[in-house]
Image (cartoon, grey):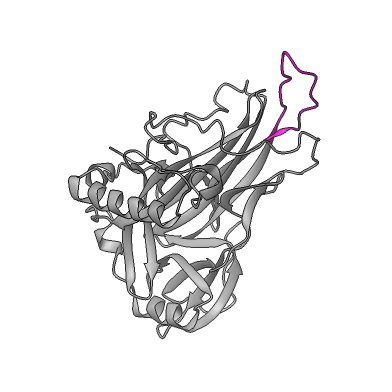
Amino acid sequence: MNQSGPMRTPWLGLPLLVVLSCAAPRPSLVSAAAEDAAPRAALAPTAAVPAVLVWSEPREPAKEEVGDVETGARAKDQARTSWLDPSGNVTSEQSGVTIAIDGGLWAFDVTRNKRASHGCPEADLHLSPSWLDAASLVSASPKATRPLRPSKDGGADDDGETPVVEKTITLAGSVGPYLFVRDYEWVFGCGAHGSWSTVPRVYDARTGSEAALDLGTDARSGSAAAQADKQIIAAITSLALATPWNAGPVQYVATEPRVSDHGIALAHVFLGGVPYAFSASSWSSYAVDTEVPAAVPEELAPYMKVPPAVAAFIASHPDRVVGGWTALSP
């Protein structure tokens, strides 16, 4: 299965496109004032252009909140891009994520778009506006914007009729020109409470289109699923629930890159269902998650080796989590 399709956060044994109807209480319906943010262009560094750009985030990041509900998405404006010399020393830094693509510099940019909310037919509620993130790559020289458009969204905002939608886009990691993005979507549909789900996507920054990477086939192989199932069972057992709990079959969520002192690797993410009070996952309010090693598709293989400058940066910045890097041609 191609991860780039609109696969939503699964829940127990239900179909993959299900949205969690009991995931979190809805945020306050009091109207909030906000302004659309202008796209942020990639800025040239003050130092001489080095060979490697590495972007990172705090190891203990703040989380995105919708009303009083923590969604699991990382809060915005925590990432920064560091320009490295061949020894891994930082020569210049700027906020946000900037990557080098085909000899040019592009900034990952997210703008907030306001949409009027619709009333509930059987309730007199004053609904707050809907806010939908849109992601793009922005270049300063030459001046250009490259929207990151999903091939098929499948979200609640497709028809524009869902009363309230809060869609938050975050960059989970990158491997060369491939961007691993999470779409968090909170929806209030006039029920007792709202619900939220997560859609993972992989974009090719060179085109702005979703990449046709086959990640699901390896994830659903017998060995990967079996290892994940053992780890989920162990995690649930460690919770010491008052009554026995059967999480059912583990469900594949996504495949994402993980960068550490040992290098870069791909990991398959699986979920197992638990009661709300025992949840420990940013993918679902009723789950624990686990990760197992993933095979590397041939499209990503050329970008998996960690440059010495990035390895040195990782070693000297234990408070940062590296999300990815790119290289500029000399």
The single residue placed furthest to the top in the displayed view is: 121
Q: Quadrant of the N terminus?
A: top left
21 shown above or below 78:
above
| Residue 295 falls left or right of residue 174 | left
| Residue 5 falls left or right of residue 319 | left
Q: Residue at x 23, y 55 (%)?
A: 295
Magenta stretch, residue numbers: 114-130
| Residue 1 falls left or right of residue 330 | left
Asked whether 56 or 125 is in front, the reply is 125
Query: How many discs mark residues in the rendered view?
Result: 0
204 shown above or below 7:
below
Q: Is residue 186 located in the magenta-colored stretch of the structure?
A: no
Q: Is residue 125 located in the magenta-colored stretch of the structure?
A: yes
Position of residue 188 measured from the top left corner of the image (x, y, whole percent): 64, 29
Q: Residue at x 29, y 69 (%)?
A: 305
120 shown above or below 327:
above
Regarding residue 169, the answer to whether it shows in the image is: yes
Q: Quadrant of residue 314?
A: bottom left
Asked whether 14 or 177 is in front, the reply is 14
Position of residue 92 measured from the top left corner of the image (x, y, whole percent): 56, 77
Magenta segment, prevailing SS (helix, strand or loop): loop
| Residue 95 falls left or right of residue 222 | right
Q: Residue at x 28, y 46 (%)?
A: 215
Asked whether 303 or 56 is in front, the reply is 56
Regarding residue 40, the answer to whether it shows in the image is: no
Q: Quadrant of residue 246?
A: top left
Asked whether 59 or 5 is in front, the reply is 59
The single residue placed furthest to the front in the displayed view is: 242
Q: Quadrant of the C terminus?
A: bottom left
Position of residue 152 measured from the top left corner of the image (x, y, whole percent): 43, 30
